[in-house]
Amino acid sequence: MDWMPLLSTLTGAVIGIAATLVADRSRWRREEGQHALEVRRGVYTEYAVALKDAGEEIRAVALGDHMSESARDAAVREAFRGTGLHTASEQLWLVGSPAVVAAGNEAFHSLRRMRDAYARGVEIGSAEDRAFIQQRRTAMAEMRSRMREDLGFGPLGIE
């Protein structure tokens, strides 16, 4: 019996199966990478929006009239809590790159410092307020830059 045709057929089948497996594995990795990127993009967007919303909410409360310091303090803190920022922060900590998490954490703390200042009565437009706003803008710009870098986008160059 001549074994050569059978061996040639078997070798061709093994090569075909191996090539299919390698191509499937490559496609799976690419799809998983794309999915992870989409998840990070969604989390980063949600976190940046929550930070922005929280800033707007606490600023609006600080502009309002309050009968007492404790009422102002409670209103500012409630405005901060009501934005979903804590949930978005936890999501960031779960899926963000280390550089993004560090920058996002700094942006969070800069906003929290601003919240505490408004809660104790710092006036909108005062020198102290302007300093907090500048710290927050710097932290937000750094966070966005890190997010863009992690998602594969270049710098905006406008911040």
Image: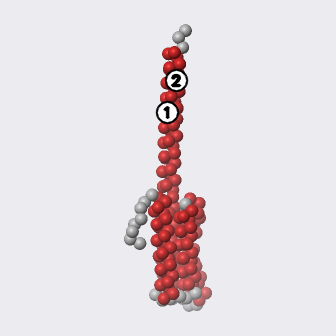
The secondary structure type at the circle numbered 1 is: helix
146 and 87: which is toward the camera: 146
Above or below, comparing residue 68 to residue 15 in the picture: below
Query: Left or right: where does residue 122 sit relative to residue 155?
Result: right
Residue 145 x, y percent position in the rendering: 46, 66
Q: Which mark is residue 77?
A: none
Q: Which residue is mark 2?
A: 11
Horizontal and vertical percent position of residue 62? 51, 84
Residue with the most extreme right position: 70
**Residue at figure coordinates x 47%, y 67% from the top left:** 144
Task: Point out which mark residue 19 bears.
Answer: 1
Q: Residue furthest left?
A: 158
For the point 48% across and 37% down, which residue is it? 23
- Residue 110 in view: yes
- Toward which corner of the image does residue 97 lie, by quadrant? bottom right
**Residue 111 drawn at (x, y percent):** 53, 76
> Mark 1 packing: few (<14 Cα in 10 Å), some, or many (20+)?
few
Report the residue at 46% width, 87% height from top.
125
Where is residue 121, by image quadrant? Answer: bottom right
Residue projecting furthest to the top:
1
Residue at 50 percent of width and 20 percent of height: 9
Under tag 2, what secondary structure?
helix
**Of the residues shown, which amino acid type is indicated by label 2?**
Thr
Determine the CA span between mark 1 and mark 2: 12 Å
Up-down relation of residue 117 to residue 138 (above or below): below
Give the position of the N terminus as an image quadrant: top right
